[in-house]
Image: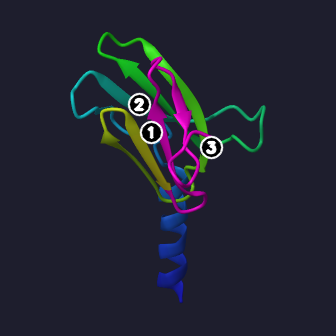
Amino acid sequence: MRKVAGFLLLLLFVAGCRDRRGRPPLPSPDGLMTLHTRIEQSRDDPGAYLCVIFEIHDHSGHVLFTENSRASDMMRWNISWVSDDRIRLESSDIGTSYWRQQADGGWVKENPVGRPG
């Protein structure tokens, strides 16, 4: 029993020390943009706290788009490029979401059937 309690304490300590900076930037398939993630640290909006924020940067580092996905960093998540103009976020708490770049260069979240919305 004592070993189990010690293991649980170690597990809680490791979980509490997680890196809240997100993951390394991911280049788009064509290399023209990068996808950056970070974790919301502000408690101003309790629903956004510790959620995954992603940014899309152009090749010179300018931010093209930023969004708080509302996917909790406390749950499993993964974000990736699907194509040069589409991103997929898979989250164990909010499900799978997609964002697509529009003809004007803006980005919009798609509804479940792949249309802007």
Pick whichever, 107 or 10, lies toward us: 107
Which numbered tag is attached to residue 50?
3
Label 2: few (<14), some (14–19) or many (≥20) C-alpha neighbours in 10 Å? many
Mark toward the start of the polypeptide (1 vs 3): 1
Q: Residue at point 50% right, 22% down?
A: 106
Q: Is 86 above or below relative to 96?
A: above
Pick whichever, 42 or 66, lies toward us: 66
Amino acid marked by disc 3: Leu
Q: Circle 2 is placed at which residue position? A: 36
The answer to which image quadrant residue 22 occupies is top left
Q: Quadrant of the C terminus?
A: top right
Query: Marks 1 and 2: which is nearer the front?
Result: 2
Q: Is 2 above or below relative to 12?
A: below
Q: Are marks 1 and 2 in contact (CB under 8 Å)?
A: yes
Mark toward the start of the polypeptide (2 vs 3): 2
Pick whichever, 22 or 59, lies toward us: 59
Q: Circle 1 is placed at which residue position? A: 22
